[in-house]
Amino acid sequence: MVFQQSGEGELLLHNGTVHAPDIEMALLNARDVFARRPEAVAMWVVPADAIYTQTREELAVRKPVDTASGQPTDFFVFGKFSEQTQCSHIGEVHAASPQAAMRVAIEKYRGQDPLWWWVFPASAVVKSGAGEADSLFAPARAKTFKDQAEYPVVTMMRQLRSKGKLDKK
């Protein structure tokens, strides 16, 4: 799972997924796929199986039950607040398991009521570093081939339909 921060002080947002043989390659793949419009200053990747998720409906039926007795660790908390928005960073909690982290997050961020909650251990995250932003993301600014305006497909299709062929330039 790929999370991107578009600017300093902006929230981290879930941007999509990539496939890779390891987590470091996933960060590089994420940069190649997602570092374009909008610009990025930071990117995180997290293995999908490290994310514990609960929907509003699931939580209405039953609350997460903590069965683990491990050492407490830090968890990041994300929530999706409408069908039209991306999952965004809400905060952090300290807990011994993903289920406990979910329970603590719901209590700590009471009133936020997202459609679904995500929690994952901070140790599962691979992040781009602050000093890496220019080398990771600046080259994408000049890559016009990633700009859909560079591909006038709609215009060409209209020309084909109206004239039966492309205009010669």
Image (tube, grey):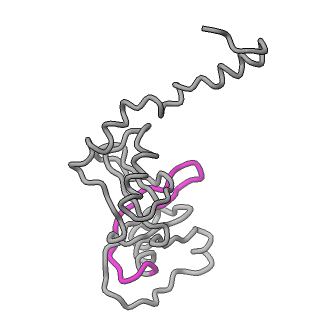
Q: Nearest the camera: 52 or 85?
A: 52
Q: Name above or below for residue 68 compared with residue 131.
A: below
- Looking at the picture, tell me which residue is in the foreground, 83 or 34: 34
Q: Which residues are magenta?
A: 79-99
Residue 21 percent coordinates (x, y): 44, 64
Residue drawn at x 77%, y 12% as measured from the top left: 163
Q: Which residue appears farthest toward the top when viewing the image?
A: 169
| Left or right placement of residue 8 versus residue 103 in this view | left
When asked about the image quadrant of residue 143, the answer is top left
The vertical placement of 3 against 144, above or below, is below
Q: Is residue 3 above or below residue 38?
A: below
Q: Is residue 86 magenta?
A: yes
Q: Quadrant of the C terminus?
A: top right
Residue, far left: 131
Q: Position of residue 157 (x, y in %)?
A: 70, 22
Residue drawn at 67 percent across, 10 percent down: 167
The percent coordinates of residue 2 (x first, y second) are: 44, 56
Q: Is residue 106 left or right of residue 169?
A: left
Find residue 77 and report its image quarter.
bottom left
Residue 3, by quadrant, is bottom left
141 displayed left or right of 106: left
Q: Is residue 155 above or below residue 7?
A: above
- In the depicted view, which residue is nearer to us: 150 or 104? 150
Where is residue 122 shown, x and y percent of the image? 33, 69
Q: Give the residue displayed 58% in from the left and 68% down from the top.
A: 56
Q: Is residue 16 magenta?
A: no
Task: Tell how many labels.
Answer: 0
**Which sits in the foreground, 127 or 85?**
127
